[in-house]
Every structure is written in C-alpha cells, then in structure tokens.
Image (cartoon, helix red, strand yellow):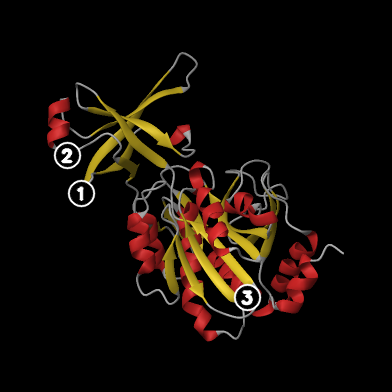
Amino acid sequence: MVDIKLLKDLCNADGIASNEQEIRDILVKDINGEVSFDGIGSMIVNHKGIGPKLMFCAHMDEVGFIVRHISDIGMLHLMQVGGVKDSAKSFQAVNVTLEDGKKLKGLMNCSYDDNHNVKDVYVDIGLSSRDEVLRAGVNIGDMVCFASESEMINENVLMAKALDDRVGCYILKEVDKRLKDIDHDNNIYLSFTSSEEVGTRGGKCTTDIVNPDVVFAIDVACAPDLVRNYTNQRQLSKGCMIVHYDKTMIPNKKFLKFIKDVAVENNISFQCDMFSGGGTDAGSAHLVNGGKLAIVLGIPLRYCHGSYSMTDLRDVEELVELIINIIKTLDVEKYEVISSYL
C-alpha cells in the first residue's frame, strides 16, 4: 500500500538540478542500505549480494527556475532550469528558497513577445524596490519552485508538483524497505540521481561509479491530455509503463521480453509505451564502460513540467511489485541469457 504521506512530502519538497538537499534529507531517513554519494549529489544506496549487479535510478530534481536579475522595482527575473511548460509560467504561486533555507512566497508571471511567445518570466514577492528585495535576503541564483501543495483528489489519484520524478524516488524508497523481506542474491543499487532534467547527468555519474550489469531508469511520462485510446499508452489506472523506445535508448529485445514475462507471470498490469522525443537517465547510463543492459520503467502522469501533475497510486504499487519481482527473478543464469548476443 502506498505511503501517501511520504509521497506527498517528497513532492512538496523543493529541489531543482544541483539543489536537491531537501529531497536527500527525506530519502536518507530510515534508509536500510549502505549510503554513498557521487560528486554531483546523487545518493547511492547499496544492498549487497553475490548475484548480478542491478542499478535502479530515479531522479530527485524537478523543473523550476533560478533568480537571474533583481530589477529596480523589486521584481525577480528568472532563468528556467529544465523544460517548464510555457502554460505554467503565468499567475503561479512559487517559493523562493534563500541561501539559509528560508522560503519567501511570491507570484510568478510572464511577458510575451509579438508572436505571443513567453519572453520574460518574473516573480513578485510583494516588495517595491531592489533594496527591499536584497534586505529580504534574496540573491542571484536562488531557487524558485512552484508552491503547489500535494493533495488526494479522490481515493486513488494524487495531484502534486514534481511527480516527475519524486514518484520514482518514492518507488525506490519503498523497494529499499521491502528488500529485507524477499529472497534473492542480487547486488542491488538504488540511485537517487541529481540533475536529470538538465541533461541526464546523475545517471551517467552513478553508473560510472557503480558499474552495474543492468540499469533500470524509473521515471514518468505525460499522457496526452484528452486522448484515451490506443495511441495513449500512458493512461492512469491502466498499470505501469514498460518503455520499448525513446530517442536516447532502445532496450535489448530479449531483456524487454523478460521484463514483460515477469509482469504477466505475476499478474502485474502494464502498458507498452514509446517516447517519440526525450529520454531518461538510462540514455546516458547505458553508454558507460562499453554499454550496459538497460530499460526504462515508468509511471503515467496527466500533465507534467508545470505546477501540478496527477498520478494514480494503483499504478505506483504495480511498479513497486514489478521491481520486486524482477529482483527475485533475475539471477545469474537469466542475466547470461538476456545479455548474450550469440
């Protein structure tokens, strides 16, 4: 059963690329594995074993902004960090996180050019001059995130910011908790990565350190808002996603079949998804040290890279169960079969 409070807390925390301390603080609490960090802030949790080395990664960072300029009339002009949708840049409540961790509330808005494209994004924190803003503690480079409070909008659906990819972080945290109760020999690494939204950086760094046999990226994908037919394999409540293709990685066919077989054998609902654009931590991770067996497993969302997204907790539980059963099933013999090109 999904720990709704933990998932809400992860989403409510603020953390753009290289500013993920609030998320690390939540994740490291009551962790069961051995914890280490890479050089850019990714947290690696190891459950030692003698079988294949399996790494599951989910990124901590969300899309957001940093302060790039403070105007004479006290407006905070912003630089975008990650792919924030233009539709989410006007009349949004935000948090400005100061160097000491204090947060100031503000209202984000934007101006447009002659072609109705977003030209400038700024935050009003209710002050009227640059000097007042500086005295309030604001500095160039301060993080700005949506001030969206997570809430259950029905018994199954959570609406929150930063579900990309705090839901993945939640899933790995849940796996960390359940590993002690399952029978397996694998050497498991759970990597909570930094800076995915600005170039899948943490996936590469942690893979370089861990040097796993197999990489699993646990991420999300946004469903088309109004489409509920065969062209949408990201429907809420229809199961987790097994990704067959994206622009940065295509999984080994034998490995893909193995994952689908595990799902079928354990009555786990899944959707066969493909990304026409974009990628995940697996895109950079699978190229390390001569190439790694890799796949993307995901959670469908409605809406993404804005002030709110929606996820169905039943899909979240399905992916936790799929990961647990992969760990129980993927032994040395099966690894040798799915990784062989002979």
- 62 sits left or right of 280 in the view: left
Q: List the residue tagged with mark 3.
A: 327
Residue 304 image offset from top left, x and y in percent: 50, 45
Question: Dot 2, crowdedness within 10 Å: few (<14), some or many (≥20)?
Answer: some
Q: Is residue 80 above or below residue 278?
A: above
**Kind of residue indicated by mark 1:** Asp
Mark 1 to mark 3 CA distance (whole Å):
41 Å
Which sits in the foreground, 100 or 160?
A: 100
- Which residue is denoted by mark 1 in the rendering? 100
| Residue bearing the label numbered 2 | 137
Q: Mark yes or no: residue 238 visible.
A: no
Sequence order check: which comes first, mark 3 or mark 2?
Answer: 2
Q: What element carries label 1?
A: loop
Residue 28 vertical position relative to residue 116 in the rendered view, above or below: below
Which residue is located at x 60 percent, y 44 percent? Answer: 224
Say which element carries label 2: loop
Q: Distance between the residues labelled 2 and 1?
A: 9 Å
- In percent of width and height, residue 259 lies at 71, 67
Question: Residue at horizontal 64%, vertical 78%?
Answer: 51
SS label for mark 3: helix
Residue nearest the viewer, comparing 23 with 161? 23
Q: Which residue is drawn at 44% across and 55% down?
A: 60
Amino acid type for the residue under numbered disc 2? Gly
Q: Residue 266: x, y in percent?
A: 68, 77
User: In the rendered structure, which disc, 1 or 3, sits on the residue that comes first in sequence?
Assistant: 1
> Disc 3 and disc 2: Cα gap in Å?
48 Å
19 left or right, relative to 216: left
Label 3: few (<14), some (14–19) or many (≥20) C-alpha neighbours in 10 Å: many
Image vertical order of residue 256 relative to residue 304, above or below: below
**Disc 2 to disc 1: CB gap under 8 Å:** yes
Q: Are marks 3 and 2 in contact (CB under 8 Å)?
A: no
Q: How many marks?
A: 3
